[in-house]
Image (spheres, rainbow, N blue to C red):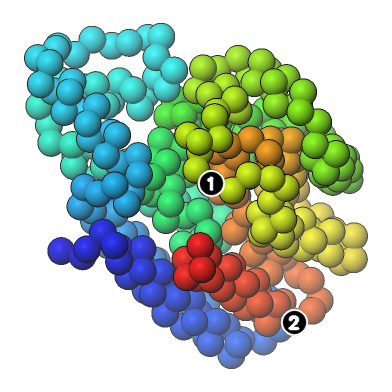
Amino acid sequence: MVSPEIYFGVYIFAVSVLTLFCIYTYTQYPTRRVLKSNINGEYVIPATITILLILYIGFRPLSRIFVDMMNYNETFNYITNSGEYFELDGGSTNFIFDNLFNYLATNYYEVVVLFVIIATLYFGCLYWSLKKIFPNDLLYALVVYLGALSTFAYGTNGIKAGAAASIFLLVFAFYKKPIIAAIFAIISLGFHHSMTVVIYAFILAYFIRNPKWFLFGWLFCLFIAALHFDWLTGFLAEFADDQSASRYLLADEDAWGGKLGFRWDFIVYSLPPILIGIWTIYKHKVIDRLYQLLLCTYLATNGFWLLCIYVPFNNRIAYLSWFLLPIVSIYPFLKLRLRTRQYIQLNYVAGFYLAFTVLSYIFL
């Protein structure tokens, strides 16, 4: 069994090898879009990777290194040992996750069953959504997503939010079928209440189609964040009207234990999809409905994080936009005609995100 101390190291090494393979492969292609599968076995290889990830992450050893994992384990064992019977709790904050958790615990399942189910949802929904969005470039899209800064973390630590976000990706994959998309949005909300912010952002993006207004809104949020208004945190906590969300917004600094302040590193990490969006829409004059939804939802949710940038646990708020970040960044290069060397530029994007994640692992 892989030691918990090197679990992420093994993961990111494998992802790095796959990313470098894709980068090398895509340097061989012409600059114009290829309207067929670029790699033989396009679905077989990503599906195999997805299954291996489910097994690797789902059966990971119990360890404090995975932070929330031990909290879930302790709560799970407490419920199991209490001898309680399962009763559907219609008023729980995270209706689907909480009831699934209690059902497994009260019926004497091992806690590993919970982690395997969540890993299956996390990576399975990711695979499904990327297959729908990038059918011709699934492998590259998958490895870029796996190399993003928060992908591993939310498969092992913030697993409720991770599963919810991965399910929500299917909302974009099925955006042309509103009823199906709405069902996935409701399911994602049932796993984690924070998806309310993403749902509101998606609705705004659905009805307000001009990315200019979302860009102006993001710049305004950045300006407000730079001014650092203390009263804003309390306002947002009251606006959230949710015990767990308010706990993050009003948490004590000692309970957080991470960096506080104006996170230039997080802003630098969040900026590329916005710059790529401006370059795509205003220089190349490309209009694509799905890209508009992805970019505008990202701008709205990332702007919300900027307003919360000084609070403890702000990385969990940032994830409400970061789970979209890899897709928003690579979409123009894999789906649109940009009349440029888009595969070379795609390789730069993939390399940037992988390097950011690797360097964060080494130095932080």
Where does residue 48 sit, x and y in percent of width and height? 30, 65
Q: Quadrant of residue 309?
A: top right
In front: mark 1 or mark 2?
1
Going 70% across and 77% down the picture, which residue do you hit? 345
| SS for callout 2 | loop
Q: Residue furthest bottom?
A: 28
Q: Between residues 99 and 31, which one lies in front from this camera angle?
A: 99
Q: Between residues 240 and 175, which one lies in front from this camera angle?
A: 240
- Quadrant holding the N terminus: bottom left
Going 27% across and 39% down the picture, which residue do you hit? 70
Where does residue 299 sit, x and y in percent of width and height? 74, 44
Asked if residue 44 can be seen in this view, the reply is: no
Label 1 neighbour load within 10 Å: few <14, some 14-19, many 20+: few
Image-based side of 209 in relation to 345, left or right: right
Q: Which mark is residue 358?
A: none
Q: Residue furthest front?
A: 254
Asked whether the beta carbons under mark 1 and mark 2 sit within 8 Å of each other, the answer is no
Where does residue 175 sit, x and y in percent of width and height? 61, 40
Where does residue 339 sit, x and y in percent of width and height? 81, 76
Image-based side of 141 in relation to 234, left or right: left
Query: In the rendered view, would you say 324 is above or below 278?
Result: above
**Dot 1 or dot 2, earlier in sequence:** 1
Amino acid type at circle 1 is Gly
Q: Which mark is residue 258?
A: 1
Query: In the rendered view, would you say 24 is above or below 320?
Result: below
Q: Quadrant of residue 211?
A: top right
Going 14% across and 12% down the picture, which residue do you hit? 84
Amino acid type at circle 2 is Arg
Image-based side of 158 in relation to 7, left or right: right
Q: What distance separates the C-alpha of mark 1 from that of mark 2?
A: 40 Å
Asked if residue 72 can be seen in this view, the reply is: yes
Q: Which mark is residue 341?
A: 2
